[in-house]
Image (cartoon, grey):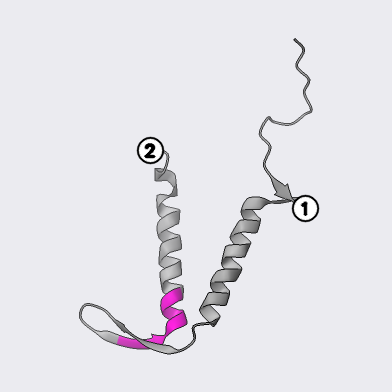
């Protein structure tokens, strides 16, 4: 049996218009997150264990988004173990 090589490395990633679908997915999530942040501009009280602060809701949402992103980045290598 003869194997014909087309010069590819054997793994084919899906792309749309030459852009990997992973980057498109990330861009869509970022746009939706920014849209959600700007839709929530009112001020809210945020209660911690000891104290309470008043801040715009978008700041609390952004802090939560960044904390989740940092946690995901830190734990990304542990999924295969």
Q: How many marks?
A: 2
- Magenta range is 53-61
Disc 2 crowd, CA 10 A, few/some/many (<14, 14-19, 20+): few
Q: Residue at x 57, y 67 (%)?
A: 30
Residue wearing tag 1: 17
Furthest residue in direction top, as rendered: 1
Q: Is residue 57 magenta?
A: yes
Query: In the image, 33: left or right of 11?
Result: left
Q: Determine the residue positioned at 75% across, 16% down.
A: 3
Where residue 76 appears, x then y in whole percent? 44, 49
- Residue 5: image location, x then y, percent: 77, 23
Vertical arrangement, residue 40 with respect to residue 72, above or below: below
Q: Position of residue 19 (x, y in %)?
A: 72, 52
Crowd tier of the residue under label 1, counting other residues whose Cα lies within 10 Å: few below 14, some 14–19, many 20 or above: few
The mark found on residue 3 in the picture is none
Instruction: Confirm or deny contact between disc 2 and disc 1 (CB under 8 A).
Output: no
Q: Give the residue number, with chain letter if any, for mark 2.
A: 81
């Amino acid at each position: 049996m003869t194997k014909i090589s087309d010069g590819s490395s054997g793994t084919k990633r899906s792309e749309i218009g030459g852009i990997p679908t992973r980057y498109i997915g990330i861009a869509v999530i970022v746009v939706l997150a920014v849209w959600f942040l700007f839709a929530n501009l009112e001020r809210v009280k945020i209660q911690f264990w000891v104290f309470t602060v008043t801040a715009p809701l978008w700041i609390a949402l952004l802090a939560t988004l960044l904390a989740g992103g940092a946690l995901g980045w830190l734990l990304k290598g542990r999924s295969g173990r």
